[in-house]
Amino acid sequence: MNHYFDQLLNVYWLRPETALWRSIDIQAMKNFQFQSPSLDLGSGDGIFSFIRAGGRFDVTFDAFQAVWNLDSFFDKVDIYNTFDTSLCPIVIKKADYLIDYAFDHKENLLKKAKALGLHKHFIVGDASKRLPFDDNSFNTIFSNIVYWLDDPKPTFVELARVLKQKGRCCVMLPNKTFPEFSFYYNLYIKQKKDKFKFLEKLDRGRISDNIKHAKGKDEWIKMIESSGLKVVMHTMHLSKTTIQIWDVGLRPLFPLLYKMVSELSKDKVREIKKQWIEIFSMFLKPVAEMDSELDKDIEPGFHCFILEK
């Protein structure tokens, strides 16, 4: 856990709440290992999978070197969906294994992923449609995007189709409690109080546009089994405390922080970043390590399912 958290905080230092969430994700899927041929469905820029695979970046690299349209940050714009050929990640340790295919609907993110040396092939596509792979193609698949889709049922069917017999798939899926942990949902959407409308700026479309499906364990299992897959392992993670830290974090300050950092010399950024990481590590690493012990009277916000065909 410590190694992953440190690397994630190095990359997401201006958004430390992201490092907190993703480090707990990695711990949740500790019983899943990629076996070739493999697919990273919804790979994005590849940073999460690269760090999970043991890759390490130099301290001078972060996830914010190629962002755009910061002035529209609070208008649900994906500031990461851009690519700059002059900016390359400085990898000080390669990943311990390779993943055969990276699949994502954003070409710019796949271009970023190519620079990491983790994936062999890259495909731009829509995971809500028929996947461009033959039946029985993969031994392992990882996906953290199924709940983003309008209808996850056909995608589970596709996962079953492209998995080999006895192949395994790891998916992260929101629990029915997840929306309740969101300030935007609980105060504005659920209670319908206009005085909390400002929380739309905080949410930035996460609950309204991205977290389209949040279900209890039994509901997800029913959908999974109807697709031809079976659950071989299930765990839950991301406590209410953790998610509420993530729900705000430094998100509202990010555009300003980015602009401030952009005005500094590389040496000054390195100096400040080192101190910044030490401070946030002091407060967030213990939260990551004790996530499973927090809020035991409330079901956590996410499921991790390992499925088999």
Image (cartoon, rainbow, N blue to C red):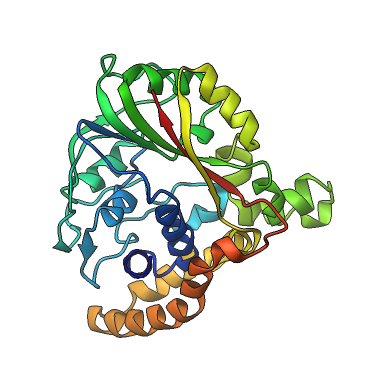
Q: Using the rendered view, name the quadrant where residue 22 is placed.
A: bottom left
Q: In this view, does 188 lie to the left or right of 158?
A: right
Of 97 and 260, the residue lying toward us: 97
Of 136 and 87, the residue lying toward us: 136
The image shows residue 176 at horizontal and vertical percentages of 67, 41
* Residue 151 seen in render: no
Of 101 and 84, the residue lying toward us: 101
Q: Is residue 27 left or right of residue 40?
A: right
* Residue 172 seen in render: yes
The image shows residue 209 at horizontal and vertical percentages of 58, 38
Quadrant holding the C terminus: top left
Q: Is residue 205 above or below residue 254?
A: above
The image shows residue 113 at horizontal and vertical percentages of 24, 46
Q: In this view, does 184 lie to the left or right of 19?
A: right
Q: How many labels does the image show?
A: 0
- At x 19%, y 46%, the residue is 118
Of 9 and 238, the residue lying toward us: 238
The image shows residue 110 at horizontal and vertical percentages of 27, 40
